[in-house]
Amino acid sequence: MSDEAYALTTAEQARSWPSRRILWLQLFLHLYWAGSATAGALLGSLIPHSVNGLDFALTAMFTVLALDAIRDLRGDLPTPVLALLSAVVARLSFPDEMLLAAFTLFTAALLIRHRATGRRPSHV
């Protein structure tokens, strides 16, 4: 599963899509992602070192995906807040293992939230 496929299939409108459509979407987006990554690896060496700002493109893409996901939450503000807090705590406490620590903290926070409220978050 690619990030793009996840963002599309967790949106509200995707709930009515048949599973066959989601499967094909996953397949084509994965092939697109793998093909683009391969082309980027092969052609990346041709980009001159003087090009500035290209390293920010992936960060910008993830920012846009995150903003779209937050807009689609519709009232489930605690989920992105828990994610942000998990990332900040992980960065301060475990800077060398931030990603693993943030995922662990976020998962633990979601489990505690589920147990405390007795309901599942709407989009996790």
Image: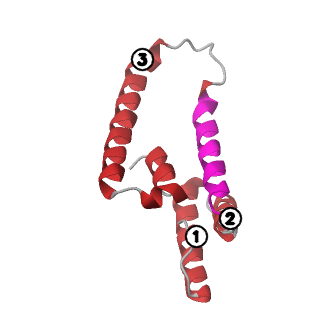
Q: Which mark is on residue 105?
A: 1
Which residue is painted at 46% across and 20% down in the image? 44
Location of residue 122 in the rendering, given as x and y in whole percent from the top left corner = 56, 70
Residue 121: name its quadrant. bottom right
Q: Whole-Å distance between the Cαs marked 2 and 3? A: 38 Å
Hey, what amino acid is under mark 1?
Answer: Leu
Residue 39: name its quadrant. top left
Hey, what amino acid is under mark 2?
Answer: Val
Location of residue 12 in the rendering, given as x and y in whole percent from the top left corner = 54, 59
At numbered mark 1, what does the secondary structure look like: helix, strand or loop?
helix
Mark 2 neighbour class, 10 Å CA radius: few under 14, some 14 to 19, many 20 or more: some
At numbered mark 2, what does the secondary structure look like: helix, strand or loop?
helix
Location of residue 14 in the rendering, given as x and y in whole percent from the top left corner = 46, 56
Query: Does residue 68 appear in the picture of this structure?
Result: yes
| Circle 2 residue | 89
Q: Earlier in the sequence, mark 1 or mark 3?
A: 3
What residue span does the magenta drawing correspond to?
55-74
- Please indicate whether residue 85 sits to the left or right of residue 25 in the image: right
Closer to viewer: mark 2 or mark 3: 3
Mark 3 neighbour class, 10 Å CA radius: few under 14, some 14 to 19, many 20 or more: few
Q: Whole-Å distance between the Cαs marked 1 and 2? A: 8 Å
Residue 118: name its quadrant. bottom right
Q: Earlier in the sequence, mark 1 or mark 2?
A: 2
| Circle 3 residue | 43
Q: Is residue 65 above or below residue 44?
A: below
Observer-nearest of 78 and 21: 21
Mark 1 neighbour class, 10 Å CA radius: few under 14, some 14 to 19, many 20 or more: some
**Pointer 1 and pointer 2: residues touching (CB < 8 Å)?**
yes
Which residue is painted at 51% across and 60% down in the image? 100
Q: Earlier in the sequence, mark 2 or mark 3?
A: 3
Q: Is residue 38 magenta?
A: no
